Image: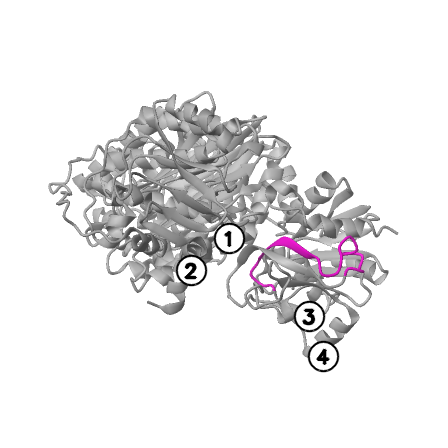
Amino acid sequence: MKWGVVRFPGSLDDGDALRALADVMGQDARILWHKDEGLGGVECVLLPGGFSYGDYLRTGAIARFSPIMKSVAKFAADGGLVIGTCNGFQILCEAHLLPGALTRNRSLSFVCDRVWLRVENASTPFTRATRQGDVLRLPIKHGEGLYVAPEDELRQMEERGQVILRYVDADGRESDAANPNGSMRSIAGVANERFNVFGLMPHPEHAVEAMLGGEDGLKIFQSIAGSER
Amino acid sequence: MSERPVSLAGEPKVSVEQARVFGLAPDEYRKIEEIIGRTPTYTELGVFSVMWSEHCSYKSSRRHLRKLPSKSELVVQGPGENAGAIDVGDGWAAVFKIESHNHPSFVEPYQGAATGVGGILRDIFTMGARPVASMNSLKFGSFEHPRTRYLLGGVVGGIGGYGNCVGVPTVAGEVMFDAAYNANILVNAFCLGLVRKGEMMSAKARGVGNPVLYVGSATGRDGIHGASMASAEFDKESEAKRPAVQVGDPFTEKLLIEACLEAGKTGAIVAIQDMGAAGLTSSSSEMPSHGGLGIELDLDQVPLREANLTPYEILLSESQERMLIVAERGREAELQAVFEKWDLHAAVIGRITDDQRWRARWHGQVVADIPIGALADDAPLYDRPAAPPKTVPQSKASGAEKHPEPAKALRALLDNPNVASKKWVYRQYDSIVQSNTVLGPGSDAAVLRIKNSRRAMALKVDSNPRACALDPYLGAVGVVCEASRNVACAGARPVGITNCLNYGNPERPEVMWQFIRGVDGLRDASLAFGAPVVSGNVSFYNETEGHAIPPTPTIAVLGVMIDVANHVTQFFKNPGDAIAIVRTGRPSLAASEYVTIFGLDGGQLGAIDLKREAALIDGLVEGAEDGLIRSAHDIAEGGLAVALAEACFNPRAILGAEVELGRAGSASAVDFFGEGASTVVLSIGVNDVARVEKLFAGRGLEFAVVGKVTAGPRLKIDSAVDEDVAELQRIYEDAIPRRLRSGD
């Protein structure tokens, strides 16, 4: 599969995502520059973590206006696969390609840790290599990952299966203690109604090698790679 | 050309009194007049005062620092550039340095710490190396001191706020709380970068006529006289020095990292240096001076945040995220294109000259014209008097003191913020970005793989001010031993050292004596381990109203391992494994956390046998390389009992341990909680015990199997301790959060 990893000024996990896809998984992956409008014929766009444009205003608020985001929006509208991790998730919400918003962590501080996540919907292009109820171990590192959306929207999202990942404990149970940032309904990752755009606060690209603490992130990328049209 | 430099209308009159205001001694002022043959202009006086400040000139420390060993076959760059570099194999050089940002962090903790991180990052990427890891060493006042929480929150927030945003992982550190730092905290920031050998960049200018480019943030009024602030004691007015603290912009720093590394690949950069302490003045004088050349600056070309900055302000500003570059003549546009790509502006602000003068023009006037060597290399050099303090710390140990029960003491130690888990701190740092972190914070040493290589690096930063207070020489030796041992516990051979020497006012003979003894200790330990000191920083004047901090040499050690697959962690792995202790001498309670929290007298430090310390390191590295050691944990704060508990806290699943220290009841507080001489707790597969014993006993070290790892999570030591490991871990993890919650 042909992947494009967008590099915004202030992107930080772009190199890690490129390495995970190209070096670890042997995929055809390239960097897409934020000032360019072309997507180079890629089949999946990845928006990486980081602090795009410094995120001094509000996370993702500037990045959504970058030239490449016009093309990404069109690509998504045409059914192309888009995944955003961490800052990428924040940008997708700001760009209204995903519902809801990400706000300051409940603790008011940055949190870097490894968390457990339960797969809530395994029939999406982003999770089809998993099974519903599987518990994944992925790292998080963010200051603004508290997911919020209006109650009625959340209800509809749940009904449609748009909530893809939830923070849980090692046994797969939701709890306040297992929710690292205070997200509503322990939501860690969501998809759009068409299930071609996916955002998550955890970092699958940082869980692709056993030596660095786990390989569960591969399941997300393998799902996408297996969705090739 | 013989234009006479002039002071500007409205500038204060230059005099010996004005010099004193700027921190220059009357003798120094007279030397300036002698050097330039006239009364300096106001701008010139300001320039001299920052360049001759202790912070920039190392005038009290330089002659002592020369004693430090700085050579080995692995040294790629010793002292003299922005950072040192060591060959770590497979064509890579590791560029690293540690630096203090103590004074600004006390005045404004968030920005002080943040810009400390930013400054040390620039020292690394200035060398052409991509920064891959940060560490920090933090000293706060006692947890009960009313200002400590504010400073802790601010400093940790600042380190995270900056480090997380530039994409350099913070992989290790140390945090200590002690009343001795109530009025002077320490923030020491370390950074390490990797560069291909042969692609390193330099700060030595060459080529008369080459253009000088200014890149990065525009210049504002922040940080003026920051270097002077760091060269004076604090007093009641220090809070008012807040304007001398700079404000950081990590986003611009991230752009600078990418742009400077990309610009370096063009080959059009002759020399590059960051505008750190003393800003434009230091970078523009040091680069040409190191190349035996001069410079002419046109201050009207310097990008400004506000229009009406004076030349004095432009030259002394310590605005952050600025770099100065000497380019190949005619290739300016090539470099400018790279910076434009990253939305950064590169302005030509001067030319390299051959007259060895440092000249600055502003609005068509010459405002400074100084022999360049006088600024950069010929600052005053002092051999300050040194004498041991008249009152030597005396041991009152009577042997009759009342010791708490070991189990109670263990719980109290685990609940002490100096011993307890620092997870509250390091959870606020991105420790994994760049995908190299094999072992992050919460271990003896961090382990970083080198991509596309089997090799890995281990990193550790350490200090022991309580030991240094008892004996500044032995304390410094002990710190190097401990940091090196930590690296060796991970399976890496120590290959290089960087140091941040934090002391009081060097004009006081007893502080100077402490400093000299510390440098001696550092030298002897560095020689013993064959690990040269390739970079460093001195921070004097850490005192307030006559009270100095304890001598605090902070040492960071780089270790290299041949195969990352052989790295060792501190955690017990398998039930049934043998637990063994290796040591180089007898433990002691001197300077221990135990005597500190129970108010006991620990006596004097024991001697350190550096030959045995080196043998221990050899044994640990060889054992790891042969895959014989399942876990290795160095005994530090809290002694053996705490080390055993920590080894049980395996993040995968906690384990237990059964340990017999001696014939029933014969073990005493020093066995449980002693620190001092090097001791390492190992766990070993039962079939490998004989081989491991040979490894250490064969080197003349004391080796004893003392127990075994158990599946049941209880820690049993003799009949004195029988504790639930999960409960101990809860105490250990909650000690700092609990205090922050409750406000006690």
User: Do marks 1 and 4 share a subunit?
Assistant: no
User: Do marks 2 and 1 share a subunit?
Assistant: yes
What's the magenta bit mostly, secondary-structure-wise? loop
Instruction: Indicate whether B51 appears above or below B183.
Output: above
Residue type at numbered disc 4: Asp
Mark seen at residue A152: 4
Residue type at numbered disc 2: Asp
User: Do marks 2 and 4 share a subunit?
Assistant: no
Extent of the magenta region: A122-145
- Closer to us: mark 2 or mark 4? 2
Classify mark 1: helix, strand or loop.
Answer: loop
Distance CA(mark 1)–CA(mark 4): 36 Å
Which residue ends up furthest to the left in the rendered image?
B390
Chain letter, disc 4 residue: A
* Residue annotated with mark 1: B429
- Report x, y in % for residue B623: 48, 28
Residue in front for this viewpoint, B388 or B442: B442
* Residue annotated with mark 3: A100
User: Do marks 3 and 4 share a subunit?
Assistant: yes
Residue in front for this viewpoint, B209 or A178: A178
Is residue B208 visible to us here? Answer: no
CB under 8 Å between callouts 2 and 1? no
In percent of the image, x 65 and y 45: which residue is there?
Answer: A16
Chain letter, disc 1 residue: B
Residue type at numbered disc 3: Gly
Residue in front for this viewpoint, B34 or B682: B682
Classify mark 4: helix, strand or loop.
Answer: helix
